[in-house]
Amino acid sequence: MPGRAGHGRRYPTARRRGTLAGVLADAGSAANPAGAHAQLTLAYALGFLLSVAIFQVGRFVPLIASNVNALVAAVFLYVPAWLLWRRGDDPRRRAGAQPVRKSLVVIALYLFVVMPLFIVGFAISIARPACACPR
């Protein structure tokens, strides 16, 4: 379908269409949002399966059992990064100054609005307990 207006990108060939390799090769493009959905589903499924495997191994290995939370967090951070790397994409390339500015504004609002209100409320709750608790 190279003749469609506004689409300069070719779709996957017929032999690759419908296979996991074809979906992953074309995933994430504007021309194939279904491929991006398939890749996201694959990332979550792979992360879930690895998390279950880590938990099951942790039942027998005390070192893994004591670090299950960190290992599961690492799985959900690095599986999508690994899939991006396999696709040849670099997530840092898309980040510009705009997301950084928005994040800094949110952090400033938190530090200068939410934190002072929390500190005042916490100090009041410590000074006057809500109930007469026996000591």
Image (spheres, rainbow, N blue to C red):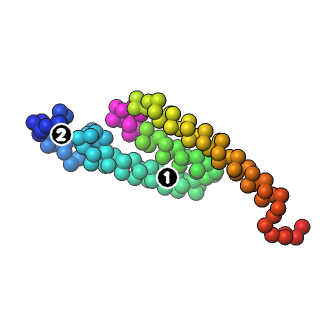
Please identify the dominant SS of the magenta region: helix
Instruction: Examine the rendering and report whether any part of residue 82 can be seen.
Output: yes
For disc 1, the marked residue is: 51
Q: Does the magenta stretch include residue 6?
A: no
Q: Which of marks 2 and 1 is nearer the N terminus?
A: 2
Residue 15: % across, % down: 15, 43
Q: Which residue is drawn at 36% across and 51% down?
A: 41
Q: Which residue is drawn at 49% across and 42% down?
A: 77
- 78 to 44, vertically: above or below: above
* 96 lies left or right of 8: right
Residue 26's label in the rendered image is none
Task: Describe the element under mark 1 as helix, strand or loop.
Answer: helix
Q: Residues within 10 Å of mark 2 (few under 14, many from 20)?
A: some
* 49 lies left or right of 29: right
Q: Residue at x 75, y 51 (%)?
A: 120
* 121 lies left or right of 1: right
Q: How crowded is mark 1: few (under 14 residues within 10 Å), some or many (20 or more)?
A: many
Counting labels gives: 2
The C terminus lies in quadrant: bottom right
Label 2 vs label 1, nearer the camera? 2
Task: Describe the element under mark 2 as helix, strand or loop.
Answer: loop
**Residue stretch rendered in magenta on the structure:** 82-91
Residue 51: % across, % down: 49, 52
Three-letter amino acid code at the position of disc 1:
Ser
Three-letter amino acid code at the position of disc 2:
Tyr
Residue 35: % across, % down: 28, 45
Q: Residue at x 36, y 35 (%)?
A: 86
Residue 11's label in the rendered image is 2
Instruction: Examine the rendering and report whether any part of residue 21 can be seen.
Output: no
The N terminus lies in quadrant: top left
Instruction: Pick out the residue farthest to the left.
Output: 3
Closer-to-camera residue (63/114): 114
